[in-house]
Image (spheres, helix red, strand yellow):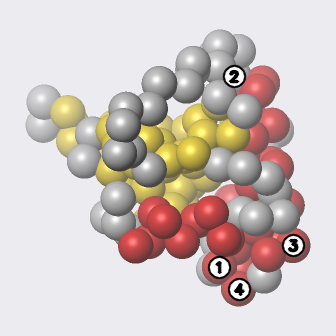
């Protein structure tokens, strides 16, 4: 795991326990079995939906994009504001918004993978 991804445990300490799992060259960030954030290229993106996207729009935070078959695809994740890394209370507020968007998405929680010996 990258130092950046490892640092998120401290960033979100006031929100609660998080787990990061490798996915597609980055990491998914989970709380309570639900993915509420993702890390790509040492950039944190938080889950959004119709109820929360205005907070991100107000700050003009870009959506996570990737290329698929020559087309640019956007996901329902937006770049986290800088305050997340400067203020643990703000980090908890933004994490809760993202986690609540994940809850509203209707996606079932992912079961935790069993740890193998020597795994962190």
Tag 3 secondary structure: helix
Q: Which numbered tag is attached to residue 105?
A: 2
Kindly report the distance in space between the C-alpha atoms of the residues bearing marks 4 and 3.
9 Å
Which label sits in the foreground, 2 or 4?
A: 4
The picture places residue 116, in percent across and down from the top left corner, at: 37, 32
- Report the residue that reaches farthest toward the left: 70
**Residue appearing at x 70%, y 15% in the figure:** 106
Q: Which residue is labeled 3 in the image?
A: 89
Which label sits in the foreground, 3 or 2?
A: 3
The picture places residue 54, in percent across and down from the top left corner, at: 77, 53
Question: Is label 4 in contact with label 1 (beta carbons under 8 Å)?
Answer: yes
Q: Is residue 35 left or right of residue 1?
A: right
Asked if residue 89 is positioned above or below residue 16 in the image, the reply reads below
Q: Which residue is labeled 4 in the image?
A: 86
**Residue appearing at x 81%, y 37% in the figure:** 100
Q: Which residue is labeled 1 in the image?
A: 85
Q: Earlier in the sequence, mark 3 or mark 2?
A: 3
Kindly report the distance in space between the C-alpha atoms of the residues bearing marks 1 and 2.
26 Å
Tag 1 secondary structure: helix
Kindly report the distance in space between the C-alpha atoms of the residues bearing marks 4 and 1.
4 Å
Kindly report the distance in space between the C-alpha atoms of the residues bearing marks 3 and 2.
25 Å
Kindly report the distance in space between the C-alpha atoms of the residues bearing marks 3 and 1.
10 Å
Tag 2 secondary structure: loop
Asked if residue 64 is positioned above or below residue 67 in the image, the reply reads below
């Amino acid at each position: 795991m990258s130092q950046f991804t490892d640092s998120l445990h401290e960033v979100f300490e006031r929100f609660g326990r998080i787990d990061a799992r490798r996915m597609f060259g980055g990491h998914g960030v989970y709380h309570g079995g639900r993915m509420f954030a993702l890390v790509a290229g040492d950039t944190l993106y938080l889950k959004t939906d119709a109820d929360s996207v205005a907070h991100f729009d107000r700050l003009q935070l870009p959506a996570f994009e990737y290329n698929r078959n020559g087309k640019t695809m956007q996901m329902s994740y937006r770049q986290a504001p800088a305050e997340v890394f400067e203020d643990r209370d703000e980090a908890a507020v933004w994490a809760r918004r993202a986690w609540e968007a994940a809850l509203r998405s209707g996606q079932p929680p992912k079961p935790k993978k069993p740890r193998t010996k020597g795994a962190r």
